[in-house]
Each structure stands twice: as structure tokens, then as C-alpha cells.
Amino acid sequence: MHKIAVIPGDGTGPEVTAEAVKVLDAAARRSGFEYEAAHFDFGGDRYLRTKEALPDSAVTELRGFDAILLGAIGHPDVKPGILEKGILLRLRFELDLYVNLRPVKLYAGVETPLKDKGPAEVDFVVVRENTEGLYAGAGGTLKRGTPDEVAVQESINTRKGVERCLRYAFDYTRKRNRRKTLTLCGKTNVLTYAFDLWERAFHEVGSVDYPDIKRDYAHVDATCMWMVKNPEWFDVIVTDNMFGDIITDLGAMIQGGMGIAAGGNINPATVSMFEPIGGSAPKYTGQGIINPMAAIAAAQMLLEHLGESDAAARVDAAIAHVVAKKLKSMQAGKMGYSTSQVGDLVAAAVAAL
């Protein structure tokens, strides 16, 4: 019995999460596993009522689950940064979700802005370090608001943090078993201290424990260039927190947009959290027109993480079938179906395929 925490969140989050849960139900029936879900109301509405983004008891309680399914965080009536730091970043740091996993997969029938590229060329994964780097929050300001103001933001990289991210990426590349190539994305020619550590650890760990995995390196600017020009060159990319944040949004665009992009915040030893990438999209709230595919893809990643490989494969095949055969567009309001109807289509495909 899997225990799954569901946080629908803000805006269109509850709408897309409902469809992801609908597909989880269909997958459980089809593949013969059981799960129980508990819903939590963390988000903007709760914050406006209580002035508390996340109660102290929440992190402890969430540790008791096998996985978390998150809808979206972001409320138009809450100052930007409060919910993101108070919920998302706090969960990442306190649950030690040290890997952000982002598949960049183009499904047949989904439009990409890349000329002459299709599903065969756009199929790689980014492993982003998720708890260190520039997002660790180290730094400060001096003489704020004056002409002499100084702002310092420090990138914190520890051998432990870097190595565990690298090991996850090597293991994932081996399990993926596609081209068995892991590319380190960095900036060794400028960020000489941080990426000296990354590069040394990359080759030391790879040469000793993963001799079957080919190691490659690309500067982050070159990585962006090749993701657009030759995405087929990549199998798995591993990088630090900030560069990973940037290149995964680029990846979302080349795989067809935020409507299909999903990600996981992973700690293999404890609870992990899965979410659509596109945000709460408050302008579409309550209209029933938002695309739920990214949330459904997040559920697919959750199933894979829980070891339900048969169910995960069925959901992936169902997504591929619906986007290729049913939807007119991936854009909100242009799919040819409502949000709930898209969920129905995927659930039916899970049962039938």
C-alpha cells in the first residue's frame, strides 16, 4: 500500500491535480496495486487565512508518506516569494530533496519550435542539484538603498552534496540504458572554484564506480546552444542548481511547452515530490480549459519512483496516445476538450491500451 500526499495548491493546481489522481486511480485498477491519498490545503488561500505558509508539523507529517503529488504554488493575492520560499523551498531543503529530475521528452503530435526535430531527437533528462548552489541563501547586503550598496550571493557546493547528485545521475544514466552518456553542464572556465569541485568529483566517481558510462562536458552556454541545434546529442545532463533551473525551462519549451513538462524533487531514501512545471496559471482558474497533461506526467514519474513500472509505462503510453490522436493543441482553451475530459481520455487509455 503506497501512501501519497496530495497538495493541490493554488490557481489551476486543484483542477490539474484532480485529473492526475483520476489517472492514478485508473493505473491502480489496471496494474493491481493499492494506494491511499491524503489531501493537504497548503497554498495561498490557507496563507491568507492563517498567515502561515507551512505549519511546523507539516514537514514531519509529510515524511511519513511515500511520495507527494503537488499541483501548483502561486497566488495573485500573496506577494511573490512568500509561498515559493515558505512551501516549495522549505520542503526541498527540510525534506532534503537533493535531486530535481526533469525529463525532456517530445511526444508525437506535440509541436516543438525546433525545425526538423521530432520525438527521436528530443528525449533526454536533466538531473539538477536541488539544495545547494546559489539557492542555498548564503549572502547579504551592505549599505542597502545607498549609492554604495553591496549585494553578495554565494554559491555553496559541498563534496557531499555534489557527489550524491552525481551518483544519482550516473545511476539514472545506467538504468535509462539509452546512450549511457552523462554530460556535466558547468562553467569551468569562469566559475573555477565551484566547478573545479564538480569536475573533479565527476571524473573521480565516474572512473571508479561507473566505467560503463561515457562522461562528457559542456559549458552551460554551449549546452543551451546544442539543446536547440542538436538535442539528440544528449542522454542525461547533470548540473548545479542555478544552471539546472535555466536549462530545464529551455527544455520545457523544446518538448512542447509547460503544458506537458513535469518534474520530480527526489530523495531516494525518503519521500519525494512530483509536480507539473507550469505554475498555478491563475488567469485560467475555474474555467476548465487548462491542460492537465503535465500533472498527469508528474503522476507517471511518481509511479516510476514508487517502483510501479507497469503502471508508469501504461500512463506514459496513454499520454502519448491522447496527445497524438485526440488533442488539437496543447494550449489552454485550444485542446478541443475540457480539463476533465482530457483526464477522462487518459484514464480510459490506461485501461484500454
Image: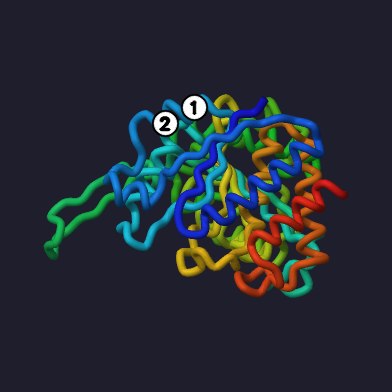
Please report contact status of discs 1 and 2: CB closer than 8 Å, yes or no. yes
Give how far across and how far down residue 90 sits, in percent: 39, 39
Residue at (79, 32) in percent of width and height: 32
Residue at (81, 52) in percent of width and height: 349
Q: Is residue 321 left or right of residue 306?
A: right
Which residue position holds label 1?
A: 63
Q: Identity of the amino acid at label 2? A: Val
Residue 327 seen anywhere in this rendered image of the structure = yes
Q: Residues within 10 Å of mark 1 (few under 14, many from 20)?
A: some
Residue nearest the viewer, comparing 326 with 257: 326
Q: What mark, if any, has residue 59 been given in the picture?
A: 2
Q: Identity of the amino acid at label 1? A: Arg
State whether residue 346 is above or below residue 6.
below
Q: Secondary structure at mark 1?
A: loop
Residue at (60, 44) in percent of width and height: 101
Query: Quadrant of the image for the N terminus?
Result: top right
Give how far across and how far down residue 112 sits, in percent: 70, 70
Q: What mark, if any, has residue 226 been given in the picture?
A: none
Give how far across and how far down residue 60 sits, in percent: 42, 26
Q: Secondary structure at mark 2?
A: helix
Q: Is residue 187 left or right of residue 290?
A: left
Q: Is residue 81 left or right of residue 253?
A: left
